[in-house]
Amino acid sequence: MGVPYLGLGLGGKIGGIIPRQEHINSTSDEFCHGHTFLLRPRMKTFKLLFGQIDICSIHRFNLLRYALYWCILSIPKEERRGKRLLLIYEYKVAGTPKQYAAMDEAIKITQFIRNKCLRKWMDERGVSANDLQCYCAVLAKEYSFASLLNSQARQVAADRAWFAIGRFYDNCKNHRPGKKGYPQFQHDNRSVEYKNSGWKLDPDGKHLTFTDGCGLGRLRLVGNKKQQVATFPLKQIKRIRLVKRADGYYVQFSVQAERQVKHVATGAQVGIDVGLKKLSTDSNGNTVANPRFLRKAEKKLKRLHRRFSRTRKKSANRTKARQKLGKAYLKVQRQREDFARKTANALITSHDLIAYEDLKIANMVKNHKLAKSISDAAWGQFLSWVQYYGVIHDVPVVAVAPHFTSQDCSGCGTRVKKSLSTRTHICWHCGLVLDRDHNAARNILDQALAYLEAVPWGTRKQADRAPRKASGQKTTAASQQ
Ligand SMILES: [Zn+2]
């Protein structure tokens, strides 16, 4: 029975409070007790919005539960969650070649199920997320190798397919310009994810045993001694993910935990402008150099690429060359990540407000001449770490619209047109001479402050970014409203 229940017999009605029940069509007395209860529970009369009704203890409990549920739902999401985050604890995994092969197999099964689910969605109309989850069981019966993987891990694979489908639907619904991202079949999957079954963590946190049919067995965890995932209760470990990287296999524990750092107020507020020459320039004129990790590694990478392309296909040397190349890229990736995190953390700990420009990086990368430099600077990674540390330190991080931030004068607000190659801002109106990026950073801070004056931080849901400043003259909070 799929219809929502609307009446509770005995004259009284309560709309939609009782969830779906399988025995709705039975008489009211039967319904109230269900078929399985032999003893008649004590009835009590309740006065509800819809009049007086008789209700048994089971439904009293249900009513209470739903009332509680709605109370919780009415609390804003942010307050309900607090600073709850999913922390990722990562360990390298030490195992035997046989175990590594088993991991590869599990990863392949995940990819197989994801692609099969996608195929089903493409071939049939109106397939829902739930249908895909049910389809996992069908696949497990049909293909013996698929049944080796833990059932919840199979469902995660189906969720991955639905994630791609959902994103495509969202893009269509929101009329996203350009390509809508029609889901693609995956051929390079590198991870398999378990929920809360199919694995067992040793109490000392040094070994992880997988119990499903893939034959992964007991694996030793090699990792940071300061980060002990075993210190968390098992209930908080929501997912376990096995990831294959160029230099080996890793296991990630996603732990639901709270993380908050006491922020020491410094009174400093800053706007930052990200660029290619300098990674960031703040409104006080301080700069952070762009480390250009890719440019530095380019010579080595090119050599490795040449060596790789000289090898014969399917040869052992080719595999070796590929692994070396993969490791070299992994190093660049890690250097970037490390730098972005450390810089972002330093920025947040030393300031009480950060304002940045909300750049459309995906569009900027389309400029082929700058694409490599923009990607190498990793602005997006840097800014997302700034936001992350902002949440943890409880420091406001405001994004402002990027229009005219580098054109307008930060002293008087006059628009001074300049091309991308003009590195200095010279105002013909007030005579201000500043570095281009420094000027932009000051504008960004001004915009953020004007926005915060109108909408104080934390009072109501902040917009995605501060609205664009009215062109020309400097705006006050009043004129922005
Ligand atoms: Zn000026």
Image: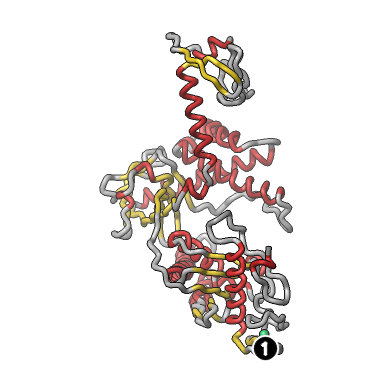
| Above or below 237: residue 301 | below
Report x, y in % for residue 326. Answer: 48, 65
Q: Residue at left 63%, top 72%?
A: 371
Report x, y in % for residue 237. Answer: 39, 45
Q: Which residue is the site of mark 1?
A: 430
How did the renderer colour the structure?
secondary structure
Going by the image, does 261 lie left or right of 368? left
Report x, y in % for residue 343. Answer: 45, 72
In the foreground, 78 or 474: 474
In the foreground, 66 or 34: 66
| Above or below 155: residue 322 | below
Q: Decide: few, some or many residues near mark 1? Use Cα within 10 Å; few <14, some 14-19, many ≥20.
A: few
In which quadrant of the rendered image does the C terminus lie? Answer: bottom right
The reply to whether residue 85 is visible in this rendering is no
Question: What's the residue type where badge 1 is placed?
Answer: Cys
In which quadrant of the rendered image does the N terminus lie? Answer: top right
**Is the residue indicated by label 1 positioned so its CB lies within 8 Å of ligand 1?**
yes
Q: Residue at left 63%, top 36%?
A: 128
